[in-house]
Image (tube, grey):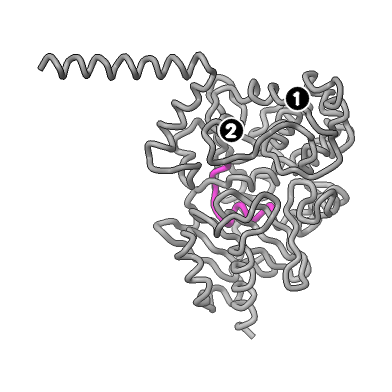
């Protein structure tokens, strides 16, 4: 019995020392990481993890349901699509043709209104909010210096960094896009209770505006710029600028770092569903216009969907030429996709638990081609 007491005391002391060490070394965010992710058997963020974090509610306005196509759900999934859905844990797969729901199906207990994490599809929204802030006169142009809004970045190389550089992933900062390392700044940003402090600690080490380097930190910094420029919390500006005007059928959630600091995780973490996510794809497909109203400047939309430094990325949107067709994409960490083909008037949405084996930042995983190819096979079989 004495031995057990000594053992228990030793365990308590070791645990206390561990916790103290985390605070002393400023890595106490790992406590939240262990509690919300690692103790649940995950090595990275997961589809429903929004339930474990603080969120801000984004209200819907007057819902505008998608109409069903005359051939709604007349064709079933191909065998290749069924296999991909099973292999990669698809929870939603939707094909929209001529602005009508042509096909939809949901899996693994999810339905049309189930929420799941957008992950980096949120970056497209934030870039759009930058365009909206320019349109509203809060930001002068893509060339306005970041330092005008965040004085931390108004000296040296940082003074050359523009809001457009943030949107096109060309900031030149020392951000490390490492999802699976518990000590990376990407992991810290996901779990830290004071995200602004994390961001203001970044250094601009390379010349801004020269090359594409995928960086979630760029989008997070852009969100801070937009808040300073507009005087609004980003989630409120999002609600007023896009969520309500585009007729979302469901209220949604956007994760924040903490209730105290109230800064959205702008590079990720909008919890919504396939058909409401698809609305932003339609807005860009239609050159910023919705129901006859110009929500976003058409010139800005065109520029966003045009490569800047890399042929795979514009301003907040991924670009892919596949089978001779140019696709525009919102894209998230575990295979969240809104894929737009404007000439064919087709939008493909896929949400799920994982994607095929990653080939590295700035490249495309093979599952994307499967979701495109099989959608077109289904559409063509109609004829």
> Which quadrant would the N terminus be assigned to in this image?
top left
Q: Measuring 69% from the left and 33% from the top, which residue is drawn there?
A: 175
User: At 83% from the left edge and 54% from the top edge, which residue is drawn?
Assistant: 306
**Can you give x and y, in whole percent of width and height, for residue 154 in the image?**
84, 21
Give above or below for 65 relative to 36: below
Nearest the eye: 96 or 268: 268
Marking on residue 342: none
Could you tell me if residue 293 is visible in this image?
A: no
Name the residue tied to disc 1.
228
Q: Is residue 274 magenta?
A: yes
User: Would residue 86 appear left or right of 241 to someone viewing this image?
Assistant: left
Pinpoint residue 128: horizontal percent, then vertical percent: 75, 44
Residue shown at the point (74%, 61%) measured from the top left: 320
- As drawn, the residue found furthest toward the front would be 3
**Sequence-wise, which precedes: disc 2 or disc 1?**
2
Q: Which residues are magenta?
A: 269-280
Foreground pick, 383 / 5: 5
Q: Which residue is mark 2?
A: 184
Element under label 1?
Answer: helix
């Amino acid at each position: 019995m004495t031995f057990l007491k000594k053992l228990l005391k030793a365990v308590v002391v070791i645990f206390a020392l561990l916790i103290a060490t985390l605070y002393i070394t400023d890595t106490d965010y790992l406590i939240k990481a262990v509690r919300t992710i690692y103790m649940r058997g995950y090595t990275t963020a997961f589809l429903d993890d929004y339930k474990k974090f603080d969120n801000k509610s984004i209200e819907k306005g007057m819902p505008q349901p998608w109409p069903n196509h005359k051939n709604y759900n007349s064709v079933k999934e191909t065998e290749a699509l069924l296999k991909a859905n099973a292999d990669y844990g698809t929870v939603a797969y939707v094909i929209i043709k001529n602005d009508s729901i042509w096909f939809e199906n949901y899996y693994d207990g999810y339905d049309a209104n189930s929420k799941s994490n957008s992950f980096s599809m949120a970056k497209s929204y934030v870039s759009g909010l930058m365009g909206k802030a320019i349109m509203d006169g809060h930001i002068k142009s893509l060339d306005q210096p970041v330092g005008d809004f965040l004085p931390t970045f108004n000296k040296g190389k940082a003074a050359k960094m523009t809001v457009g550089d943030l949107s096109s992933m060309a900031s030149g900062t020392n951000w490390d896009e490492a999802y699976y390392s518990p000590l990376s700044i990407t992991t810290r940003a996901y779990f830290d209770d004071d995200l602004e402090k994390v961001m203001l600690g970044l250094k601009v080490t390379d010349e801004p505006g020269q090359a594409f380097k995928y960086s979630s930190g760029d989008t997070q910094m852009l969100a801070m710029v937009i808040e300073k420029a507009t005087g609004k919390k980003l989630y409120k500006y999002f609600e007023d600028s896009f969520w309500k005007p585009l007729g979302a059928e469901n209220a949604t959630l956007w994760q924040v770092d903490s209730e105290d600091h109230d800064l959205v995780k702008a590079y990720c973490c909008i919890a919504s569903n396939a058909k409401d996510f698809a609305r932003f794809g339609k807005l860009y497909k239609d050159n910023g216009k919705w129901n006859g109203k110009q929500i976003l400047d058409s010139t800005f939309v065109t520029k966003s969907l045009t490569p800047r430094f890399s042929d795979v990325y514009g301003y907040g949107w991924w670009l892919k030429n596949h089978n001779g067709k140019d696709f525009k994409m919102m894209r998230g960490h575990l295979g969240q996709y809104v894929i737009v083909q404007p000439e064919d008037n087709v939008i493909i949405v896929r949400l799920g638990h994982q994607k095929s084996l990653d080939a590295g930042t700035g490249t495309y995983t093979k599952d994307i081609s499967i979701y495109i190819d099989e959608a077109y096979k289904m559409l063509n079989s109609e004829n």
